[in-house]
Image (tube, coloured by chain):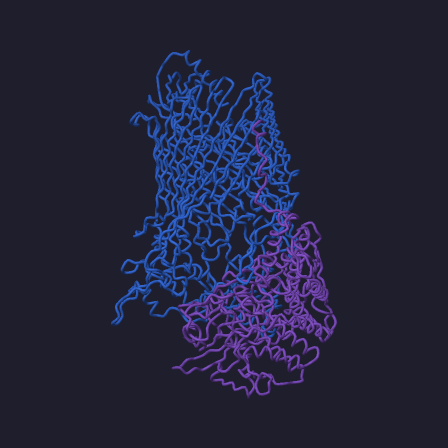
Chain colours: A purple, B blue
């Protein structure tokens, strides 16, 4: 008995466990731990580099295929997924960890967790008396809260563009005893919610990146850029069906309203009007140059730091001084999309395209995006002809199309460098180039071809290095046909933003996936006979797309059985 | 009790013996497995009053008076022997234990019981029976010996080969909620601590199985209890036993791999199937076959090159025991040394021992002091030093199994100049040095561990208050520390290794350095860490009452206060990690036990505990766990005696009660919500990482223990003369409620991790027992004991959302039921044509094809792929087409048959143990082509010409096809297994006392074997049948041991 009474009461539970009070502390005017909590919400942003099972998501579009037959991205490309086997890299609904090939910083939670974390922060940050405020008087804690609201809006949009309308939770947080048999909100409600959030917070975040700790936080530009993208998607044919035949409010609007394009154009115009952003002069170095080094094209990024992981995953195989993984094989379809240096499509008889020298005199973005046979790559011209060093055809992972991806990498245009150079590997979510293309597309749809539309496209092409030409149209020519210009804008978007996780969703929102994805993916087979090269174009992968089912993902089977009120998307 | 009975026997026997005149004198020595046996009674047959008792050296002298010329030797707990004397004047008597005498004493919680008075379900063995089994761990010796005991030994690695064990199977869906409580000398031990105990120190092992025996442990009793008592000194002169033994270990199963020629052929076959250019030319194949190019086209059997066929183990034990009226002592020491099976590779830097090994030194001193007539003191001190060694960062067997690590054709064992080679093959992209190089120079990991236990106990007899009352106070302290040293030579590929290029034309032979390697060895890097530092203090105060009134009304009682505080620290944990064990755990409670019997005929016991732990929030910590049991010795009734005189014991008994389990999965403090450190996020123009916090799983402030309602009905019988035949049978029916599982039916929208809740419910029922028979024919004595255990569980509720098809429901299945696809044959060329035709007509998709399904991985089906049943006829094979296949990995039936025979000094004992009704499936390097080394079964792979007799799907280099058990688990790969083992064999010769030199009092020689033969029912995998399911099957293979020993007593 005496011995029992002598027992200490200390350490009745693990003292290293941090409580809510510690994180949201009403006495902490520096808000250190609350800010650390905010960073964990930021941490749910995913770098897109080799994100899906070690591949770029674009390897599931018509722009590229995976060099590895075992990559899950191929399940997306070949339409083999279902509500029980959506590849984990694209399942933001349930999958709780994602990791790329070389361990890029990636999220640890599903986007529903990310939204839950944001709500926890939004509800609790008010008690932390953080000092400081914006010039317009918004207190620092409300700035942080707005950042969390932006991130939440971003996560919602990532869900909506994949699934259509999803349950909107507001600021609610839940416990196991809550009623969680929620129904989906309609697509229209989701878009309205996200846009309203953007409107509500646009003046309570920092306006421009400045200072060490502020760099890469959410800015006003990021908020408006998200709104511009959301409205562009909402106006697109997948959700805003011109035939007005959709009756399912979860998968899109049930009416057709062409003025949605006006909203989208205005939203892009709002970003342009900030006058804070411009195109970085070098397309090639756009992704390896940071804001602090004068790159004011970047609006919002996932900072990753510096390294050579992109090269380790994607650079050509067969270079002994710098061994690349060669996982990404860009398709001939993408190669053919790049115009000539004069801006004219290769199918244009006046473009000067020479089938015997297919890579000569192309749009400079071609060489900055794709590594092709004969291009300068580190020590020597790249050899991707059959049997060449970078296409040994020995059964190991190597290009299946005759091309490697070169975008995002840093390499000189001569052969002076022998190994990979470490460089910035940030993932760019929003950049000014996209804003111009968003504007051009929306304005063309809203009002038809106009000087304003062409002006946006000219800026893009001028930066790319295409000369204005004698007619001053950068090879685009002029047309008054909205449809013809639409195709040009779509192509410009494809080549300007290849591998930036745009094409995969663009072919869906334009509803052209059922056409382009049901054609075989093509590659080149180059035979080198004593220095004479012959080019044969061969199918490399049969991609599939079942329309209209696959325009939206299936809600995971596990969720539909756990919440019978969640209405499954049609066809799944 | 035993001593008191003994004392009366002595008086009864000695008094009359003095009254008769002498006739013919014989003398002798009585022994058992532990040496000479003081206190055994020897009487002349037919003249029960003429007897003697053996002295402290086991000797007796008796004057025969009657005509039977036969003596009868008795010792409590041993089989009574009748021995014809003949004309001998000196006799050696070897006694064997009797498991089923009605006076057999077995240990239960905080006390003892006998077979006749026991009302609960428990089974026990005398540790002397398993002492010579050549294994390091006590739990490895129990399979097939104790009814209700289920075990699986999944590794044979020295020092890490302890079996997982369960009492009456498993009942909880909570993976941490099935471990039995382990009690050594009334103090709780961990699994780890149990496996360190030297069997030589153990007196008895009991498992407690039902509510009446486990209720006293209350909140920790639901998984059954394993009770171990250690040996103690006995009255008599010092008795010294010394035992030394040495054994040979070898694999129970030795995997065979195909040679270079066979492997290359199969690789070419796979590449042909895949439409890829062939890696090997006809010339390569020829050179592999004729072996004329041992460096360019090597053929190395890496298994034989790396492993020894046999390796040794030794075990030595010395114990001294004895006692006087005032002090009794048992002091023992042991040394165990078990070597691993990796060969020694001489290397310039071979200063580091890279082999597996385990050594252990134990010491124990158990002292009993009689401080006064009313005060007994007891001090037990024991400590164990162990040392586990293994190669650093290498799993020697795993690397041989791993196709991407090495192949028979990948490199020679050594280059012609004696330097190390490296993997020079496109199948080994890492270009690692060969395994012998890695093992010889890669360094080791060495863990030194100290276990320390002290128990101090004082018993004060309170006869001054009332007769039969006593008060005991006990304090026990246990600590475990482990320190590991890692000696590593840095990055593997840096070990100097070369590819030999022979001379060709005018070019001389030369050596090509590994592209990742260096010319000199990297220096060893030595790092150490404190892995474990556990402390545990246990305080107990209890009062015992035991008194008989009027000769027939027997009352017993126990009131116990028990408190335990433990701190557990394990290294390599991240701050704020939920799985961190750097935390305290506290337990406190009171238990009450009341028993009454009337003339050993009607028995009733009431057991209960009120106790709790700090795993739960204040207000939810304490629970009450009562149990009641009753027994009826029918053979004490006259009517029964008259009807069935054959029964020496016929007892029916039953118990019902509630016990608990306080183990929570994962975070042990479910009621306490906290925030976790997340990954860093970069900000700034020169990017700088910032730490982050995020919300941990929600807390469950209402979390409580799991509780189990246990019903047990039992029958104890002894039949025939001398209880030759005995049987114990128990039926049990348990319902486990409030199991701590994570809710499943909550959608992901909740956005936060969920805590364990008291949700699950299962039923576990079965039958177990044993039947024993012993008899003798002439001077041959024999006994058999058959043990059977059957436990079948069923999930009644696990918060499962209603699945799309009832076939997918986990509810209603056993715990850990495997699910997978149903194999219906190989795809034929015609099947493929049918699919192609359907897809051509449906936009390239097979969706909706009700006739034949294709797997959902997007890969093109080829003839020879495994075809699975498309249960929902949607044209896709995906998880919605799974069903329950096979059985859980833990066998639900275990049988044991023990046969013993002895003739004079010779004795033989064998134990056959079998496990039935379980399944396993292996993946990855265990069986999948191009992940696993090529194995003989792959030669029977499907080809168009062997389609009818194929035993393996078509070979492919693609690891994600439908043929992969990793991605498509199925009943094709699953084995519904059983095995029967000759688990132990022991042959002993007890040297007659007269032949013993040097005044030795006893001596024996013995041969003991472990896992000697195994019969199983599968040929798909080259594995020991106790392999864990869903592994790559590269654990250290279980060992067969053939052991020879000598024991002498002074």
Q: Is residue B1036 visible?
A: yes
Foreground residue among A432 and A506: A432
Q: Position of residue B769 (x, y in %)?
A: 53, 37
Q: Residue at x 69, y 67 (%)?
A: A251
Residue drawn at (57%, 16%) of the image: B464
In the image as oriented, which residue stretches furthest toward the front? A135
Q: Horizontal placement of B659 versus A322: left or right?
A: right
Q: Nearer the viewer, residue A156 or B404?
A: A156
Which of B700 and A299 lies nearest the eye of the viewer?
Answer: A299
Q: Quadrant of residue A43?
A: bottom right
To which quarter of the image does residue A563 belong?
bottom right
Residue B870 in view here:
no
Give how far across and how far down residue B1048 sits, in percent.
34, 30
The relative height of residue B798 versus residue B553 in the rendered view (above or below) is below
Residue A13, percent across and down?
A: 59, 41
Image check: A504 left or right of B88? right
Identify the residue at image location x=54%, y=48%: B575
Q: Is residue B129 above or below residue A468?
A: above
Vertical comparison of A231 with B639: above or below:
below
Residue B783 rendering spot, x and y as whole percentages: 44, 33
Q: Nearer the viewer, residue A178 or B817?
A: A178
Quadrant for the C terminus of chain B, please.
top left
Count of residue discs: 0
Q: Quadrant of residue B433?
A: bottom left
């Amino acid at each position: 008995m005496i011995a029992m009474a002598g027992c200490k009461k200390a350490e009745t539970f693990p003292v290293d466990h941090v409580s809510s009070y510690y994180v949201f502390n009403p006495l902490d005017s520096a808000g250190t731990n609350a800010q650390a909590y905010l960073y964990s919400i930021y941490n749910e942003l995913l770098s897109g580099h080799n994100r899906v099972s070690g591949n770029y998501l674009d390897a599931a579009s018509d722009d590229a295929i995976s060099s590895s037959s075992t990559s899950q991205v191929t399940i997306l490309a070949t339409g083999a997924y279902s509500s029980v086997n959506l590849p984990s890299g694209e399942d933001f609904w349930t999958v709780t960890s994602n990791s790329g090939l070389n361990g890029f910083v990636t999220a640890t939670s599903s986007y529903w967790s990310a939204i839950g974390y944001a709500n926890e922060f939004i509800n609790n940050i008010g008690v932390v008396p953080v000092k400081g405020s914006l010039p317009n008087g918004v207190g620092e804690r409300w700035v942080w809260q707005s950042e969390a609201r932006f991130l939440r809006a971003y996560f919602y949009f990532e869900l909506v563009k994949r699934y259509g309308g999803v349950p909107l939770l507001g600021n609610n947080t839940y416990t196991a005893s809550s009623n969680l048999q929620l129904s989906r909100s309609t697509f229209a409600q989701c878009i309205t919610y996200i846009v309203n959030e953007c409107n509500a917070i646009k003046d309570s975040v920092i306006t421009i990146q400045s200072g060490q700790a502020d760099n890469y936080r959410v800015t006003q530009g990021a908020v408006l850029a998200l709104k511009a993208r959301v409205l562009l998607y909402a106006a697109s044919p997948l959700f805003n069906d011109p035939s007005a035949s959709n009756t399912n409010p979860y998968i899109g609007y049930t009416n057709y309203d062409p003025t949605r394009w006006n909203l989208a154009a205005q939203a892009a115009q709002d970003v342009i009007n900030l006058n804070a952003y411009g195109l970085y002069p070098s397309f090639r170095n756009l992704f390896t140059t940071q804001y602090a080094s004068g790159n004011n094209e970047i609006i919002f990024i996932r900072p990753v730091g510096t390294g050579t992981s992109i090269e380790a995953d994607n650079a050509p195989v067969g270079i002994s001084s710098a061994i690349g993984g060669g996982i990404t094989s860009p398709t001939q379809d993408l190669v053919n999309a790049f115009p000539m240096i004069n801006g004219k499509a290769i199918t244009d008889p006046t473009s000067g395209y020479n089938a015997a020298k297919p890579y000569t005199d192309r749009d400079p973005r071609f060489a900055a995006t794709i590594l092709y046979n004969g291009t300068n790559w580190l020590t020597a011209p790249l050899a991707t002809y059959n049997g060449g060093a970078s296409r040994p055809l020995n059964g190991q992972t190597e290009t299946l199309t005759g091309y490697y991806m070169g975008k995002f990498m840093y390499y000189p245009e001569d052969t002076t460098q022998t190994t990979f150079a470490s460089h910035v590997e940030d993932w760019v979510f929003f950049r000014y180039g996209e804003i111009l293309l968003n504007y051009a597309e929306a304005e063309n749809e809203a009002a038809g071809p106009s000087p304003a539309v062409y002006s946006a496209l000219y800026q893009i092409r001028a930066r790319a290095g295409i000369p204005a030409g004698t007619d001053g149209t950068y090879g685009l020519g002029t047309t008054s046909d909205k449809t013809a210009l639409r195709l040009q804008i779509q192509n410009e978007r494809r080549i300007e933003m290849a591998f930036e996780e745009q094409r995969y969703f663009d072919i869906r929102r334009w509803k052209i996936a059922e056409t382009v994805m049901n054609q075989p993916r093509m590659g080149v087979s180059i035979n080198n006979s004593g220095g004479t090269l012959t080019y044969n174009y061969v199918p490399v992968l049969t991609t599939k797309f079942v329309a209209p089912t696959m325009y939206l993902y299936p809600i995971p089977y596990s969720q539909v059985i756990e919440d019978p009120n969640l209405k499954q998307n049609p066809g799944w | 009790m035993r001593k008191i009975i003994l004392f009366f026997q002595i008086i009864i026997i000695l008094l009359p013996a003095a009254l008769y005149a002498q006739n013919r004198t014989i003398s002798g020595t009585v022994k058992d497995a532990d040496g000479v046996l003081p206190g055994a009674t020897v009487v002349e047959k037919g003249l029960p009053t003429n007897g003697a008792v053996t002295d402290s050296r086991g000797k007796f002298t008796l004057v025969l008076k009657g005509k039977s010329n036969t003596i009868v030797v008795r010792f409590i707990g041993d089989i009574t022997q009748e021995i014809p004397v003949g004309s001998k004047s000196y006799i050696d008597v070897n006694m064997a234990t009797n498991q089923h005498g009605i006076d057999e004493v077995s240990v239960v919680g905080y006390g003892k019981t006998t077979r006749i008075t026991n009302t609960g379900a428990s089974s026990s063995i005398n540790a002397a029976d398993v002492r010579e089994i050549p294994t390091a761990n006590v739990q490895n010796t129990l399979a097939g010996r104790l009814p209700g005991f289920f075990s699986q030994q999944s590794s044979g690695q020295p020092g890490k080969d302890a079996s997982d064990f369960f009492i009456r199977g498993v009942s909880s869906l909570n993976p941490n909620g099935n471990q039995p409580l382990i009690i050594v000398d009334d103090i709780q031990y961990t699994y780890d601590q149990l496996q360190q105990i030297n069997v030589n120190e153990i007196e008895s092992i009991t498992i407690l199985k039902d509510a009446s025996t486990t209720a006293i442990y209350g909140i920790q009793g639901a998984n059954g209890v394993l009770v171990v008592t250690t040996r103690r000194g006995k009255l008599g002169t010092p008795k010294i036993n010394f035992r030394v033994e040495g054994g040979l270990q070898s694999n129970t199963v030795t995997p065979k791999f195909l040679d270079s020629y066979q492997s290359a052929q199969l690789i070419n076959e796979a590449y042909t199937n895949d439409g890829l250019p062939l890696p090997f030319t006809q010339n390569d194949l020829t050179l592999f076959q004729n072996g004329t190019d041992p460096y360019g086209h090597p053929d190395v059997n890496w298994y034989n090159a790396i492993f020894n066929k046999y390796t040794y183990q030794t075990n030595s034990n010395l114990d001294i025991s004895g006692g006087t009226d005032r002090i009794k002592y048992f002091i023992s020491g042991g040394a165990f040394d078990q070597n691993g099976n990796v060969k020694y590779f001489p290397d310039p830097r071979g200063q580091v021992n890279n082999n597996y090994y385990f050594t252990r030194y134990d010491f124990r001193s158990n002292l009993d002091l009689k401080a006064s007539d009313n005060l007994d003191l007891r001090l037990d001190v024991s400590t164990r030093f162990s040392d586990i060694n293994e190669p650093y960062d290498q799993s020697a067997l795993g690397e041989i199994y791993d196709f991407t690590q090495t192949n028979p054709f990948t490199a020679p064992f050594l280059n012609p100049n004696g330097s190390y080679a490296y993997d020079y093959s496109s199948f080994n992209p890492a270009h690692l040095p060969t395994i012998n190089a890695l093992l010889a120079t890669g360094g080791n990991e060495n863990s030194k561990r100290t276990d320390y236990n002290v128990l101090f106990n004082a018993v004060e007899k309170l006869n001054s208050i009332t007769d039969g009352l006593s008060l005991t106070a006990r304090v026990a302290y246990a600590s475990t520390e482990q320190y590991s040293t890692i000696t590593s030579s840095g990055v593997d590929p840096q070990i100097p290794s070369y590819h030999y290029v022979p001379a060709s034309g005018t070019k001389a032979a030369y050596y090509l350095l590994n592209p990742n390697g260096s010319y000199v060895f990297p220096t060893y890097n030595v790092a150490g860490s404190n892995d474990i530092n556990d402390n545990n203090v246990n305080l107990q105060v209890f009062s015992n009452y035991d008194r008989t009134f009027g000769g027939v009304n027997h009352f017993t009682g126990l009131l116990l206060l028990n408190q335990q505080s433990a701190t557990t620290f394990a290294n390599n944990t991240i701050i704020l990690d939920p799985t961190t064990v750097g935390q305290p755990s506290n337990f406190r409670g009171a238990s009450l036990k009341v028993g009454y019997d009337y003339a050993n005929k009607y028995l009733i016991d009431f057991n209960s505990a009120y106790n709790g732990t700090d795993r739960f929030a204040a207000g939810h910590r304490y629970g009450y766990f009562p149990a009641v049991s009753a027994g009826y010795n029918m053979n004490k009734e006259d009517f029964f005696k008259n009807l069935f005189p054959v029964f020496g014991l016929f007892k029916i008994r039953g118990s019902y009660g509630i016990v608990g389990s306080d183990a929570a999965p994962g975070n042990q403090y479910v009621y306490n919500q906290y925030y976790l450190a997340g990954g860093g996020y970069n900000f700034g123009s020169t990017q700088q990482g910032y730490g982050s916090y995020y919300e941990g799983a929600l807390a469950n402030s209402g979390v409580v223990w799991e509780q189990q309602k246990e019903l047990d009905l039992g029958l104890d019988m002894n039949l025939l003369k001398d209880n030759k035949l005995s049987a114990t049978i128990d039926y049990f029916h348990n319902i486990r409620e409030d199991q701590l599982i994570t809710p499943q039916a909550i959608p992901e929208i909740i956005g936060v991790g969920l805590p364990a809740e008291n949700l699950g419910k299962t039923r576990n029922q079965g039958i177990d027992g044993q039947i024993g028979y012993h008899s003798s024919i002439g001077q041959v004595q024999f006994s058999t004991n058959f043990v059977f255990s059957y436990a079948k569980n069923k999930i009644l509720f696990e918060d499962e959302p209603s699945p799309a098809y009832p076939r997918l429901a986990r509810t209603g299945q056993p715990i850990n039921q495997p699910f997978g696809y149903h194999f219906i044959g190989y795809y034929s060329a015609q099947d493929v044509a049918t699919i192609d035709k359907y897809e051509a007509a449906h936009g390239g998709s097979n969706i909706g094809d009700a006739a034949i399904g294709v797997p959902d991985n997007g890969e093109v089906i080829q003839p020879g792929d495994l075809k699975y049943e498309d249960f929902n006829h949607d044209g896709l094979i995906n998880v919605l087409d799974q069903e329950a296949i096979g059985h859980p990995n833990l066998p639900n039936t275990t049988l044991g048959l023990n046969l013993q025979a002895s003739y004079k000094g010779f004795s033989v004992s064998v134990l056959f143990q079998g496990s039935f009704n379980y399944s396993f499936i292996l993946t990855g390097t265990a069986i999948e082509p191009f992940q696993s080394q090529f194995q003989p079964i792959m030669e029977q792979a499907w080809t168009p010409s062997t389609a009818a007799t194929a035993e393996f799907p078509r070979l492919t280099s693609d690891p994600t096809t439908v043929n992969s058990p990793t991605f498509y688990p199925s009943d094709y790969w699953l084995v519904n297994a059983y095995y029967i083992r000759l688990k132990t064999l022991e042959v002993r010769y007890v040297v007659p006392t007269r032949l013993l030199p040097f005044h030795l009092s006893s001596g024996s020689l013995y041969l003991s074997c472990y896992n000697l033969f195994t019969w199983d029912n599968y040929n798909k995998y080259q594995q020991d049948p106790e392999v864990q399911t869903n592994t790559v099957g590269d654990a250290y293979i279980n060992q067969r041991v053939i052991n020879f020993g000598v024991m002498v007593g002074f």
